[in-house]
Each structure stands twice: as structure tokens, then as C-alpha cells.
Amino acid sequence: MKPSHPEHAAPAHGAAMQQIAPVICYPVDGLPRPDLAPFRVARADWQKLSETLVPARDARCFDVPAGHFFRITSVEGPQVGDLNLWNAQDLHERFYSGKTRALHGTHLSTGDRMWTAHPYLRPMALITDDSLDWYGFDAFGGAVHDVIGTRCDPYTHNLLSKGGQYHHCCHSNLTRALADARALPLAEAERHVHDVLNVFMCTGFTRDTGQYFMKASPVRPGDYLEFFAEIDLLGALSACPGGDCSSEHSSDSAACHPLLVEVFRPLAPPAGWVSPMVNGYDRSHGRNG
Ligand SMILES: [Zn+2]
């Protein structure tokens, strides 16, 4: 956090520097924006392949073959979800929230992609529909579906609560779900858990101090976020112990609800769609031989 009373006086050029307008780090003009029309056509005659109900304060894994859609839907009451995604064939290729944020901004919506980590860096999922796209950014700078938070975890809770032990943070829920789905020891599964897409969570940074904030999610039963799987995916979704994240997480005090994950198979893949190859960088890093 920046000091309210800086120790160093501004130099002569200080004010002028602060006036310079920002430039976008990664102009997305270089990335082809997906044409959603073929995805909408493919969606028209899809059939449900499976569904998974994620219990409150817990997580479940689900598989989504490449070329299929999946939807996360609020049921029963306002609830946010922490989403992890992996290449179903290689858990090392996983969602990269930091680069997704750099490419698409702090909060995702329809037409944005979720990217995999280095050295793969390719799209793993495309967001094809978002019933909360009307929310936009509110007067506090808050918006839904962020890639700026991490996931609530028992280590941070231990630090901030001076020794507290809480076992249903999203980090632990995701760890147990992955361990169960892939028959992994907990310690090994934990290493694959990563920073999430905060589905339905309403967050931002305070304008004065730059601190991460959360506020009551506008999600209501029936609201959904829909994805198209670009590669074979293993997903894990945690119904956060924060509930709608209007007050606190890392405890059992918030009202929590389940979340529904449904997987759909279109009769034919979207016209023109091909599963993306891994990134084209040659990985020599400037060394020859
Ligand atoms: Zn959480």
C-alpha cells in the first residue's frame, strides 16, 4: 500500500509525469477476437452430457471434452465460485489468471478467453455467455468474474487470524476435489491448485489505497456463466465459504449455497473451430544449441 505521507518529496518533473496518459500494455487488436456466431449456432441443438452439483463450502471436479460447452449456474441463493481449469491430459498445463488479466482486463465476460500457463500459453476456454454482463463496472469500480483475486486459502487465514485453522477455504476444497478425482495424495493435488477465475464474485480495487475489495454479488438463482472448451478440460469448482462474499470468507458464518455445473455436447462443432496448438515460441530463450 502506498504511504499516505511519502518520505520523499516529488522531483521537478513529478507532476508532469503523473499527467501522462496510460497506454494499454497488451492491445488486444493483435489477438483475433472470436466470432461468437458459430458458437451460438452450435449451442442451439446441444444436448446435456452431465451435471455436477457442487455442495456449499465444498468443491467438485468435472470433465469437459474439447468442443463441448459448460455452464456454471447459481441455484438456491447468491453464491460465488472459484474455478480451476487444467488440460485433462496434463495437469501442468493449467489456467494462468495473471496473463489472462493482462490480456483481457481485471474482470472477464463474453468473448474473453482463459489462457494456459507457460510454456503452453494457448486458449483453454472461451466465455460464450454471461447473464451478469449488464453489471459492468459500478461506482466503486466493482465488477463480477474477476481474475485479480487468488482463492481464499487456509495459509493466509492462519496468518491473519494469528493461528486459526479453517479447512473449507476454496484452496482446500479444490485440493480435496482434485485428489479425489485423480486419486492423488493431498500434498500432490495441492501443488496443482492455482489462482482462479472468481465466478460471480464482485470485486475491485479501492481508488484511494489500491486495496482489493469485495462486495455482495449481484448473482441470483438462474444466473450463469457459460464456456466453450478449446481443449480437453478437467475443471474444479469450489462454492466459496464466503457465500455471496458480502462480508467475510474463511469461516462458516456466511450463508452458502450450491452451484450447478452442466456439460453440453453440440451436435456438430462450431463451424471453422479447431482446437488450438500450444504456443509457437521455440523455447530457445536466446541460447543456440
Ligand atoms: Zn473462496
Image (spheres, helix red, strand yellow):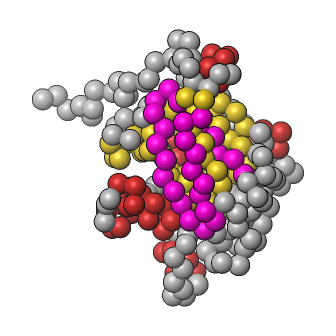
Compared to 11, does 186 lie above or below? below
Query: In the image, 36: left or right of 229?
Result: right
Dividing the picture into quarters, in which one does residue 277 lie?
top left
The residue sitting at 44% across, 23% down in the picture is: 275
Where are the magenta residues, as a range? 48-74
> Observer-nearest residue: 164 or 129?
129
Query: In the image, 29: left or right of 171?
Result: right
Q: Quadrant of the C terminus?
A: top left
Question: Can residue 225 be seen here?
Answer: yes
> Magenta stretch mostly in which secondary structure?
strand
Query: In the image, 180: left or right of 223?
Result: left
Residue 90's x, y, as percent?
32, 42
Compared to 141, does 250 lie above or below? below
Compared to 195, does 27 lie above or below? above
Compared to 269, does 127 lie above or below? below
Residue 266's x, y, as percent?
57, 24
Q: Is residue 56 magenta?
A: yes
Q: Residue furthest top?
A: 272
Residue 65's x, y, as percent?
45, 33
The residue sitting at 28% across, 26% down in the picture is: 282
> Observer-nearest residue: 11 or 152?
152
Question: Can residue 152 be seen here?
Answer: no
Q: Is residue 261 magenta?
A: no
User: How many numbered circles are shown?
Assistant: 0
Q: Quadrant of the N terminus?
A: bottom right
The residue sitting at 56% across, 12% down in the picture is: 271
Residue 27's x, y, as percent?
60, 27
Dividing the picture into quarters, in which one does residue 246 lie?
bottom right
